[in-house]
Amino acid sequence: MDISVIVPTLNEEKSIEVCLKSIKSQKTNKEYEIIVSDCESEDKTVEIARRYADNIVFSKKKSIAVARNTGAKSAKGKYLVFIDADTVMPENYLEKVFEKFEKDPDLVGFSSGFRFSRNDGKIKLIEKFTNSYLLFRDKIGMVTMPGFSTSVRKEVFDSLNGFKDVLLEDGEFSIRLRRTGKTRYFSDFYVITSS
């Protein structure tokens, strides 16, 4: 298995189908699986996920970090892609993920750019600023990977015992991941999120 896409969920019935459809319709010949890691949703999230996911796992704790880790434990892929339920990926996203890792054996993890699904002026300004900030951090070697678009080698993720169950778990994970090897922020491809 080349890639495992892990989607943590908690009452995501309004957004999960669009997210999973975007993953399911990837234009790639790479072998990938979709894992939904649910935190005891009380709506139709799991029912919808069953139509698209290869595997659904359950976390007893309502924590995005624990849900991501639970999904990663069942992952068979060489590369892990974490994407949030309110996020969609363009049809070539997984192909790009695979290419980035295969071209650079020293790369342990990265984040892609992002676009907000809303289009008003203030949101676009925040989007531009945040992408510029992430690119700046990449240039100075201090990459921060937002949880809604984090890709990491599974062996490295496992060696770090995944995300810690803390506030800003993605930032904390980024710091630990940087200590293991090369991390990057790539602005040449992106996800679309409402985060």
Image (spheres, helix red, strand yellow):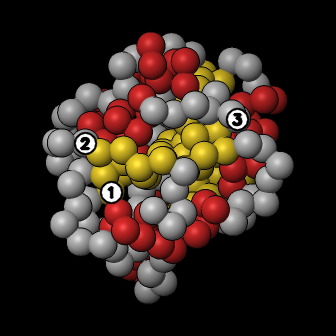
- In this rendering, would 49 be left or right of 182? left
The quarter of the rendered structure image containing the N terminus is top right
The answer to which of marks 3 and 1 sits earlier in the sequence is: 3
Three-letter code for the amino acid on which mark 3 is drawn:
Asp
Could you classify mark 3 by the number of other residues whose Cα lies within 10 Å: few (under 14), some (14-19), or many (20 or more)? some
Q: At 78% from the left edge and 60% from the top edge, which residue is drawn?
A: 27
Give the label on residue 59, or none: 2
Residue 108 placement: quadrant: top right
Question: Helix, strand or loop at disc 3?
Answer: loop
Three-letter code for the amino acid on which mark 2 is drawn:
Ser
Q: At 17% from the left edge and 48% from the top edge, which residue is drawn?
A: 62
Q: Closest to the observer: 183 or 66? A: 66
Give the label on residue 9, or none: 1
Q: At 44% from the left edge and 13% from the top edge, which residue is drawn?
A: 159
Three-letter code for the amino acid on which mark 1 is drawn:
Thr
Residue 122 placement: quadrant: bottom left
Q: Closest to the observer: 14 or 116? A: 14
Task: Provide residue 92's location: percent of width, then percent of height.
Answer: 75, 58
Kindly identify which residue carries mark 3: 2
Q: CA distance from mark 1 to mark 2?
A: 10 Å
The quarter of the rendered structure image containing the C terminus is bottom left
Q: CA distance from mark 3 to mark 1?
A: 23 Å
Is residue 39 in view from this perspective? yes
